Image: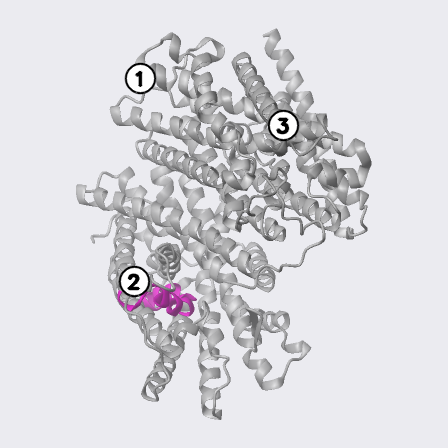
Amino acid sequence: MKETETGSSDLTPLLADADSLENQSPRDLASVSGAVFNICTTMVGAGIMSIPATVKVLGIIPGFAVMFMIAVLVDITVEFLLRYTQSGKSTTYAGLMAESFGSLGSLAVQICVMVTNLGCLIIYLIIIGDVLCGNESGGTLHLGVIQEWFGIQWWNSRAYVILFVVLFVMLPLVFLPHMNSLRHSSALSILLAVVFIAISSAMAIYSFWKGRTQNMRLLPDFANHVSIFDLFTTVPVLVTGFGFHVNIHPIRSELSRPSDMSYAVRISLAICIAIYFSIGFFGYMLFGESIMSDILVNFDQNSDSAIGQLVNNTVRLSYAMHLALVFPVINFSLRTNIDELLFAKKPVLAKAKSRFTILTCLLLALTYTIAIVIPNIWYFFQFLGSTTVVCLSFIFPGAIVLRDVHGISRRKDKVMAILVIVMAILTSMIAIATNLWTVGQKTEKSAGKKMSPAAGVKAPLLPGSSKSAPAKPPSVSGAVFNVSTSIIGAGIMSIPATLKVLGVVPAFVMIVVIAWLADISVEFLMRYTHAGDTTTYAGVMRESFGRVGSILVQICVMITNLGCLIIYLIIIGDVLSGNQPEGSVHLGVLQQWFGIHWWNTRAFALLFTLIFVLLPLVVFKRVESLRYSSAISVFLAVIFVGISSVMAIMALLEGKTNSPRVVPELDNKAAFFDLFTAVPVIVTAFTFHFNVHPIGFEMDKPSDMISAVRISMVLCAAIYFAIGLFGYLLFGDSIMADILVNFDQNSGSTIGSLLNDIVRLSYALHLMLVFPLLNFSLRANIDEFLFPNKTLLAKDNTRFWSLTLVILAFCYLAAIAIPNIWYFFQFMGSTSAVSLAFIFPGAIALRDAWGISTARDRILAAVMIVLAVVTSTVAISSNIYSLITGNQS
């Protein structure tokens, strides 16, 4: 590559010291060999320890093929980054994205770099702790090297040993201001990794010669051990192993000839492929099916001889030392990006000694603290590779090529960029879903069976005939589908509007906080249910507050669920038959296809849906029976999010999107109070507590409900933020309270119109499948409220059918009469939803009828109630004020 006029700036280190580059001698600049050492160190990192487990899952031949394919794709994306860096004026990854996508692009890179690098540094400390101090996995204690030598002492516990390593090994290295200064430690780290591989391979060959090894699989064993989805959980591990894009620009900027960077990258990729495949092959040969996600744990096995034990310890210590030397290389770009994000207008970090020192020490302290808390790194690797590393390695470079602000992309480049992005997104989504499924399956197998007398009741809340055979209890995965469906519901359609009000960053924080508080409140409910003699939410409140408590819950459930069902019908009506907000006509799908007729008006379309789609579903008398429709509804919601995100990305690449607000615009007092009107929408979106007991107590082990809820929370939070961000990107400030109405806009092309219709119809069908799940607890609570002394509802067909038909008729009439759902959501979230989700569970914990609340529980309960009441009061006041001022205007 020919150097541009910006070559001098390209050679300036990201953390420049007082001396300019022109005053440096050639020997101070990095050579190709130094760049290779730093690149290899960035790549190898902790990748070695998980590669053997991936080879076991994939098989030897597919394992090598996937490694090679990912390395080729990485080389292509690095070439994209280097070419656009050469053509532009920036010398950083974030700056490169800023040239293509503005401040939002640079922010996305900085966040991904911080998440990725901080995650890797935490992983390194965890592995070092495992090697030196051991760990406990699957109920088995694996001693560390120091504990084997000196026994278990207070001074060789995990916390003390890692603290010693951080202070006396890593701290001196992370204070070096230039990447080139780390070339010698990087070379030593690669040498230690090679020593690790050499000893491992020698042990494997010796075991093979002695006949102690197992037969290795050349291909995946689909018959006994591996499912097709298991293969996708290995891809993020390999992607993370080859993810070094965070250090491309720091290393390149210090090369004497930046054009040599491509050459250094290819040499490094070849070296790392050889390293990864060697450790994968020989590690799998050495330990076979007993290989663990962290192969180093396998090396704590007691050998038959002193020499064997010495070799084991040498392997583990060499790799721990390797990671200690990798740490400062990854820390370099992490610290730079954090400083660039927080202090964009401040002087260069190396010139601000106090800022440099404070940032370095804070990062070390944070990494150390988290490494002590998190015991398992396997899921860390999978989720990192499925999200931020995929973005940095493939999605962002591909997007830069498609955006092509410098006009240098060829047709071949754009085709390759599209393929890279599509493959990355699909693989990432499948991997995340599979990881969530795996967590649920492992929880289901490992959870204890001990329950309270109340928890031992296996009969459904609305049981069938006593003569029928007991139904097979649902699993954690089935509960996850039902819980996720209860959460998602209509929440997706209003989340983008809340991002417009709150801004992207506060909205993300709000989603996470409310999801966390909802998880705590569910834990309160389930713990007090297991301690008592009831299996319903109203029953738990009755045990704490008497008849008044149960009535309050029943009324709130009826208001919340009935409101949601009406909202669902309104949205379905908007999709099929359109609406007219503020005088503007938005046609529905049926009207766009066939024109405006009497038979596709809102009244007739909803009536048809009610009779022929919803009625057959609401007559089920067990929540378990709805698990398949719930799974389909979640899948349809994912399709809705997926298509919306693709449309948003394409609009972003074409420059048709507006820059979303990162923080809210508080121009006046009214704008400040508008923030509180958005909170109830998110609260309502996470209110599913009315279905916790019906779903949980049909499970074989109700104690698994907590695990199902947490998996669902992660899944739904990801879906909410994804649709919020991409929906806001796609429609900007024109986003409406119901985003589906935005999708009736004419896109200007047949394909665009088809995508719009698919999005709207998929979500309408999703809501049709959610409807019976919320109807279940609504019908049960109405019956319990009106007929507390009657027989079970399922045994009285007359009462069952009467209630079912009355509820459907009322929802239908209300959906026809109410034109706007925004205020419906706000007032529901401010009153009944807040009570069910936070106030009632917190009150139960404070009342503590069974004497099981801890001090922490009471503090959390009090904080939860105060936040709920304050937010609800301000939100109600703001809603009333908005209504009054809106009517006056």
**Residue 167's x, y, as percent?**
58, 70
Helix, strand or loop status at disc 3: helix
Q: Amino acid at mark 3?
A: Thr
Point 65% across, 44% down: residue: 522
Q: Which residue is mark 1?
A: 593
Quadrant position of the N terminus in the picture:
bottom left
Residue 855 on the magenta segment = no
Q: Which residue is mark 2?
A: 67
Point 39% across, 30% down: residue: 762
Distance in Å between CA atoms under marks 1 and 2: 48 Å
The residue most toward the bottom is: 306
Distance in Å between CA atoms under marks 3 and 1: 35 Å
* 337 over 543 or under it: above or below: below
Q: Are marks 3 and 1 in contact (CB under 8 Å)?
A: no
**Residue 172's x, y, as percent?**
53, 69
- Is residue 15 among what the camera can see? no
Start-end of magenta stretch: 34-61
Q: Amino acid at mark 2?
A: Met
